[in-house]
Image (spheres, helix red, strand yellow):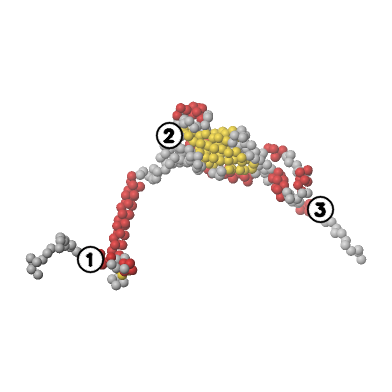
Amino acid sequence: MPEDVMVASGEYKLVKQSRRDEEKRRKKDLPWSKRIFDIDEHKLFGRTAWAWTRITLFYLLLYFLILVIVCFWLCIFLLVIIEPNRPRWLKGPPGLSMAPTNASVLAWYTHLVSNVYPIADKIDEFLNKLNDNAIDFFSEANKDTVWGYGSRKPTVFIKLNKVIGFQPETYDTPDDLPKEVPAGLDDTVQKYAGSPKIWMTCDTSKAFDTELVFFPGPFYEASEKMTGVQRVVAIQLNNMPPNKNIFVCCKVWARNIPIDHKFQGKGQIKFGMQMRVGTAKKEAIDQLHSTTTDDPKVVPALANNPPPLDNPEDRLGGLDMPLSPELEPSPNEKLQEKPEAEPLTEPPS
């Protein structure tokens, strides 16, 4: 057809197509089963086995190099930058712990050796670990050699746990104390002023007139390197009512030791004491009462004729000692004994 007869139909553009576009269009037209596993071309999710091997080795090598770099700088930080006698991880303020036990309630019988001696042994073990001649330091609270648990003056020990590098910030004057401190702490600060101290206050059950005596005083000697007895305060409980629960709450006061009322040991510690006073006879009677409540004949008999309990040793509150063994008769006494004749059951013949 001649060019003068040709009529242009409009503007048009020639779009250049590449083989990559054709490949994309071809993959788009494939069914979904072919996209996951193409058995004809041996491909899984569009990659051959060799392609999957290459990409897996690449990422394994990449993450291995990252791990080597992190371990290298961590070793430099721990072994070179941080001093050996300093903590490797940052910690909060020190907590509080108690001896002879961290149980919520400590109960014992004042007259039973099997109750008192284990408690005294735990206290001795705790103080020996301080390596500061602590038993002699607190000897004033150990008049009966069992830390008052046999003479109704029990002693507990509150320890401020050790945190390396912790420098306490103390209240040195009564004017520095916060408003929420209990009454009487300002007088204590004024009385023991002179050196930095972490102060302690303790509250007991208001229903009883229990007296608290602190050794060496209601405070910890504050320093960056608090060791031995500097971290321990002994509290002796006097005038404890027998067979009653006494609850004590102790708090420490320093600027950088917050008091958390939800968690035990964070700025405060709570514990209970129950001094059980009784004798083996009384315990047997109580047990007999509890086991014979269903028998209507036994209970009135016990109520009308109770066993005698008026024993001077029962009123002393001392420890019960084991009874002496009974002496067997000597061989001479056995020879002198004459056997009794057995009664006859049949008439003699």
Q: Is residue 140 depicted above or below 85 in this figure? A: above
| Residue 60 shown left or right of residue 104 in the figure | left
Q: Looking at the picture, which amino acid does disc 3 mark?
A: Gln
Measured from the top left, where is residue 76 in percent x and y? 32, 48
What residue is at 67 percent from the left and 44 percent from the top?
Answer: 321
The answer to whether residue 134 of the structure is visible from this angle is no
Measured from the top left, where is residue 333 in percent x and y? 79, 52
Q: Do residues under tags 2 and 1 come within 8 Å of each other at their CB atoms?
A: no
Q: Earlier in the sequence, mark 2 or mark 1?
A: 1
Residue carrying label 2:
169
Which quadrant is the C terminus positioned in? bottom right
Q: Earlier in the sequence, mark 3 or mark 1?
A: 1
Q: Earlier in the sequence, mark 2 or mark 3?
A: 2
Give the label, 2 or 1, closer to the camera.
Answer: 1
Measured from the top left, where is residue 86 in percent x and y? 39, 43
Q: CA distance from mark 2 to mark 3?
A: 85 Å
Compare residues 42 and 122 and report the one nearer the observer: 42
Q: Looking at the picture, which amino acid does disc 1 mark?
A: Glu
Q: Secondary structure at mark 2?
A: loop
Residue carrying label 1:
22
| Residue 157 shown left or right of residue 319 in the figure | left
Residue carrying label 3:
336
